[in-house]
Every structure is written in structure tokens, then in C-alpha cells.
Image: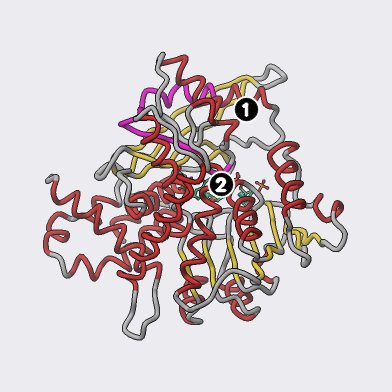
Amino acid sequence: METVVAGSPGEKEFHQAVREVARSVMPVIAANKAYAEARVLERLAVPDRVIAFRVTWVDDRGAIQINRGYRVQMSNAIGPYKGGLRFHPSVNLGVLKFLAFEQVFKNSLTTLPMGGAKGGSDFDPHGRSDGEVMRFCQAFMNELFRHIGPDVDVPAGDIGVGGREIGYLFGQYRRLTNRFHGVLTGKGLNLGGSRLRPEATGYGTVYFAQEMLATRGDALAGKTATVSGSGNVAQYTVEKLNEFGAKAVTLSDSGGTIVDREGIVPEKLAWVKELKNGRRGRIQEYADQFKGATYLAGRRPWSVPCDLAFPSATQNELDGEDAGALVKGGCLCVSEGANMPSTPEAIDVFREARILYGPGKAANAGGVAVSGLEMTQNAGCMRRGRDDVDRQLQSIMKSIHANCVRFGREDDGFVDYLKGANIAGFTKVADAIVEQGV
Ligand code: NDP
Ligand code: 2IT
């Protein structure tokens, strides 16, 4: 860790992500001479390549705007680089390195042949018109296009990047290269996108919770859930919870949290989708729209009593104190839709309380898994139906869960899903690195 920290000063999220994986896999490396000799972990903690560039574009007033753009290509040991693009003012190199590092292990867990990468920009889409977002995406692709390709690096969405942005990015890639192929995932159906990709992360996170609960003879029906965020992942988490007969009682955004003890039922969720994906408004409006709902300005959902928690907004959004409040409120299962939403202190609290804790790299892998299916559909010029994709998604989430249990079960029967996910994800990549020499 000293070498990692010295080589990436100030990148605290990156240090946090590496430390968490190192803690789990050090015993595996100590027991496997080949991994130690090949210095697999040290190699994985330095990106294969970091691309950083200026994005210059013109806003609606005719003024020139300048943003920073990045792509961190972490490892392609088991497949082409793969991972999302994030547009958010908090984006910097350290954040993208943490996300790219996590992506390597997550993608390995999916069982599909995908390496790990992440990219994005400090561009803030809030309050920008469609035209401004389009011109920004075009300017971003003007540099990115030379570094990606269907068997090189295949970006997708993340915070601030959804179907609209992927469409603009794809259009510019096609104009620049004269190629129509699967260079991005999360595309609209007209552009060769996969059915169920928008739903996949949220649905997968709920399927993962279902698997975790089943190990204790329990199920989702009748449970109360807190959900953070109100974007892509949060929306489809609530949708699937409703289908399973559970009740979601919170959503949030960077302004605060709404609490609706009656449950965010399908009609209310449809309104949230229009608010967030159509008008792009604030979640606060929910409390004005629906009687009985309240708005907690500047607060997160974790003080609301629940059986299940689905952190689905951003990194480090749930700290030790929040974890304590969740456990005290009766929470028995946490399934992470976001990447690294729980701080190390929060994870310690979950562990000590022996509750079910599904880390993001396992629980939210359904999104990139369906991205992997989109790549195979594009490569084979074919299309799968919704039920077919859903079946595959469920089967992948089950296999990720089984792998976590296999590598994470402790002597007393408790499953440390974080340890299991890290070891299972690491082992496949480590073997591939050893096989390919230096
Ligand atoms: P969206 O942009 O659709 O939604 C993000 C949500 O999180 C918004 O409600 C946003 O609020 C909130 N949010 C973002 N940053 C912050 C912050 N700093 N503080 C408080 N709230 C914040 O993104 P997604 O739903 O796609 O992504 C959510 C999480 O899921 C991220 O951690 C992402 O990495 C992860 N993820 C996404 C996948 C995908 O397929 N999209 C796959 C796997 C993981 P506001 O509108 O106010 O900014
Ligand atoms: O964090 C993630 O796994 C994503 N944002 C999805 C990446 C992808 O390539 O679909």
C-alpha cells in the first residue's frame, strides 16, 4: 500500500479500493507462489494506460467551455477494456482509477470475457440543454474515438451518462470513423442496444439480495427497503422490489431524501421516471406531489428503519454512523447498486452485526453483464428477446452469488461476500496474467 499511495498521491478513493481488495487477497497470494512471483497485485494496481484530454465546446450563449476528459484503461488481461463513463463535477483521476480498479474484479465475476476501464469528465449536465449535452458529447468523442473499438475498449453509461448521452457519443463515433459497430453499450434499440440493459443494474441488485436472503431461508416479499439515488439504478431497483412484493420507502438525490411510508408504488415510480429522465427535476418535488410523503433536506435515507438497504447513488454515501443506524433500525441485508457506497467503517459495522452485505462489485454487476451480452449481440448481428436476456441476467447473478459463497464462507458458516467477491474476481484475472508472462 505504501508503494500504491506514493505512486498516486492524493487519490484517496483509489487507495481505499486497492486496500479493500488487498486485504482480501493477500492470504491467497501468500499461498500461491506464482501470484507472488509474477507480482500480480502490484501490477493490477497500476493502470495499463491513462488517457487525459481537454474537451472544448460551445454553450448555448456562444461561450467557449473547457472540461477535462479521461479514460483509465486498467487491465485487459481477460478481455477488451470495458466500463462506464461518468459525467459529474466530482470526477477526477483518482475517482476514475478507483472505479476502473473495481471494474476489473466485477467484470471478472460476471464470467464474461471483459477487462476493466472507466472514463468520464468533470462536465456537469445539470441545467444544460439537450443541445449543450450533445455538443459536449461530440467534443468528448472527438478525442476518445481513437482509443476505443469493439475489441479494444467498449465504454457505457454511469452517473450522468444514460441513453441520451450514449446516442450522441455513438453518433459522433460513427461520423468520425465511418463504422457502425458495437463500440459502446447501453445504446438505444435502434442503434443495436440490448433489451433490458437500462433495467439490468437495478434488477440485478435485487436478484442478488434475493439470493443472499435465500441463504437464511428468507425472501423479499413483505420487506421494507430504503433506496438512495433516484437515477437509473435506483429507479429499476424500486421497480423490481415492487414486482417481488417488497416496499421501497425512500429515494434521494444530491439535495436530500424523500420518505414515503406508503411505498413508492408503480404509479409513483412512473412519475419519478418522468421527473428525473424527462424534466430532469429535483426529488424534493415528490413530497409536494404525493400526500403523506416527506422531504429531508440535505439528508440521506439511512436513518429510516428498514429490512433492506440499496445504496444506489455514489461512493462513500453510507458511513459508519449510517451503518449503525441501519442495523439499529432492523436492517438485515444491504445490496449495493452504487460502486463503493459504504465506507470501510460502515462495512466493519455490517460485518460485526453479521448482516448480509453484498458489495457493489458483486451486487451491481448485472449492468455490465448485460453490456457483455450486448457486445455478443452486436458481434453476431443478432438480437435477444427481453425474457432471454432476463434469464441470462438471473443466471449470471446466481453464479456471482455462488462464487462469493464459495470463496467467502467462514468456519462458522457466515459468508463474507466482500472477501468472496474479491478473491473470486482476482483469481481469474491473476491466472490470466500469470499465463501471459511479463
Ligand atoms: P444516474 O446519473 O442515473 O443517477 C445518479 C443518482 O445519484 C442521482 O439521483 C444523483 O443525484 C445521485 N448522486 C450522484 N452523485 C451524488 C453525490 N455526490 N451525492 C448525492 N447524490 C448523488 O447514475 P446511475 O444510477 O447510473 O449510477 C448510480 C450509481 O450506480 C453510481 O455509483 C454508479 O457508478 C453505479 N452503477 C451504475 C451502473 C449503470 O449501469 N448505470 C452499473 C453499476 C453501477 P443528482 O441528480 O442530484 O445528481
Ligand atoms: O459501474 C458499472 O459497472 C457501470 N457503470 C456499467 C459499465 C458497463 O460497461 O456497462
Name which residue type carries label 2: Glu
Left-right relation of 327 to 213: right
Side of 305 relative to 287 (left or right):
left
Considering the numbered disc 2 on the image, is that residue within a helix, a strand or a loop?
helix
Kind of residue at badge 1: Val
- Packing grade of label 2 (10 A; few <14, some 14-19, many >=20) is many
What is the x, y in percent for residue 245?
A: 65, 65
- Relative to 392, is 227 above or below? below
Tell me the element at label 1: helix
**Is the residue 212 above or below the residue 17 in the image?**
below
Q: Quadrant of residue 109?
A: bottom left
The residue carrying pointer 1 sits among few (fewer than 14), some (14 to 19) or many (20 or more) residues within 10 Å by Cα, namely many
* Residue at mark 1: 133
Q: Please name which of the two marks, 2 or 1, marks the residue nearer to the observer.
A: 2
Disc 2/disc 1 C-alpha distance (Å): 23 Å
Q: Residue at x 47, y 24 (%)?
A: 141
Does mark 2 have its CB less than 8 Å from ligand 1?
A: no
Q: Position of residue 294 (x, y in %)?
A: 82, 62
The earlier-in-sequence mark between 2 and 1 is 1
For the magenta stretch, what is the residue range? 137-159
Q: Which mark is residue 199?
A: 2
Q: Is residue 60 above or below residue 378?
A: above
Q: What is the quadrant of the N terminus in the image? A: bottom left
